[in-house]
Amino acid sequence: MKWPSHGSNPQYLYNAMGLPLPEEFIDFSANINPLGPPTALKEKWVDFFREIQVYPDPFATKLTDMISKAEQTKSDSILIGNGGAELITLLGRMLAGKRVLIVEPTFSEYEEVCRANQCEIVYHQLMEPDFTLNLTDLCSSLVAVDALFLCNPNNPTGIHYPPSTIISIVEECEKRDCLVILDEAFFDFLIEYESFVPYINRFSNLIIIRSLTKMFAIPGIRLGYLVARPDIISNLSKQKSHWSTNTIALLAGERCLQNGAFIKETQGFIGRERKRLFAFFHQNNYLASSSDVNFYLLQDPLLQDQFSLFEFLLHQGIIPRHTFNFPGLEGRWLRFAIKGHEENNQLMEVLTHWRHQHSSL
């Protein structure tokens, strides 16, 4: 079966399963802020509309300067992109023909863009159910590697690796002349997070990817940025399509970056809902990854694989993210986003129904 490679767009998943898309469903497959976009975007939407007749700034100067000030780094170390996907694609082109190490399980697009650019791909597999990142084992996998893709907090597990571990990895890679591509798409869901942007000045091999679409719930707009040393930014900029980031995205990004209170509100809500969900999972004999953010892996340990649970959930209009295209998982887990309070209640209700039917397996 050919599985859809991403969450969201559930019609493709139901088509692959040979099932009709229900009239009502809850999509737990996309890791987007359940609070929705900040109200500041709605308030300014008419003003944004007036700007669609104007070509976007190809250098995204105002947004770049805002990020530069917020992250206390130089503007020539920042590249604005059409979501993280464009930035990952640009990195794939830069790494064409190189040997790349990917820490799995992780975001499938790293491998897709590397394969499209004829990279040699090697893997370092995190072992379930804890998905612990062993520094010694990882370093032993760095033989003759040109670049390392590392997602932190990791997608799909939601696990956050401590700063000391990341710094040790970057230091080891620097000795080996190996780039570290640190994808921080979900960093702002962490209540306490030590930014690695200042380490750009210390480590010439460090590249950081950030997304604005997840926290601010604007995946339909597409917006992200990359931080690296200026020569890398210059190289990637030359490969970037002119006007790849549209005017609405740039204006929305400027407004979003002024919403610190919205981030704090989101972090508090996610933390409360995650605690409530995980207490339910424990009480009902489900396994969940030790997530620190707005999504997690879930498994019914009474099953050999999760396909029957996956199918049951789809019939109930509950749409998780399959893991068939995550190397090392191969469908043994399902990934769920943390949604709104009532939506999470419906998930727990359906999982309770499943447990009552299958507790004797």
Image (tube, rainbow, N blue to C red):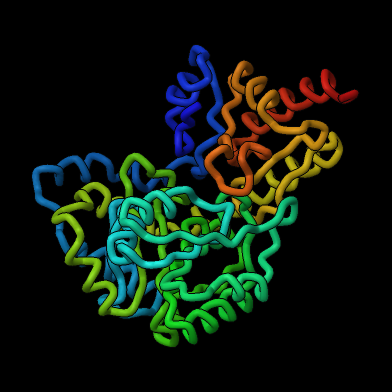
114 versus 25 height, above or below: below
Query: Residue 56 location, x and y as percent?
Result: 15, 53
Q: How many marks?
A: 0
Please report the residue visible at 28 percent of the width from the left and 52 percent of the height from the top.
Answer: 82
Q: Position of residue 123 (x, y in %)?
A: 55, 60
Quadrant of the drawing holding the C terminus: top right
User: Can the viewer see residue 84 in this picture?
Assistant: no
Tell me if I can see residue 284 in this picture: yes
Along the viewing direction, whichever of 93 and 284 lies nearer the viewer: 93
* Residue at 52%, 43% in the rendered image: 31
- Which of the pair 140/89 is nearer the observer? 140
Picture quadrant where residue 100 is located: bottom left
Residue drawn 42% across the image and 68% down it: 208
Rendered residue at 51%/56% (across/down): 186
Image vertical order of residue 318 relative to residue 228, above or below:
above
Relative placement, left or right, of 277 versus 211 is right
**Could you tell whether 335 is left or right of 256 in the image?**
right
Residue 333: where, in percent of width, then height?
A: 67, 39
Q: Is residue 250 shown left or right of residue 128?
A: left
Q: Nearer the viewer, residue 177 or 232?
A: 177
Above or below, 255 against 25 in this view is below
- Whole-percent x, y for residue 138 in the image: 61, 70
Quarter of the figure with residue 201 = bottom left
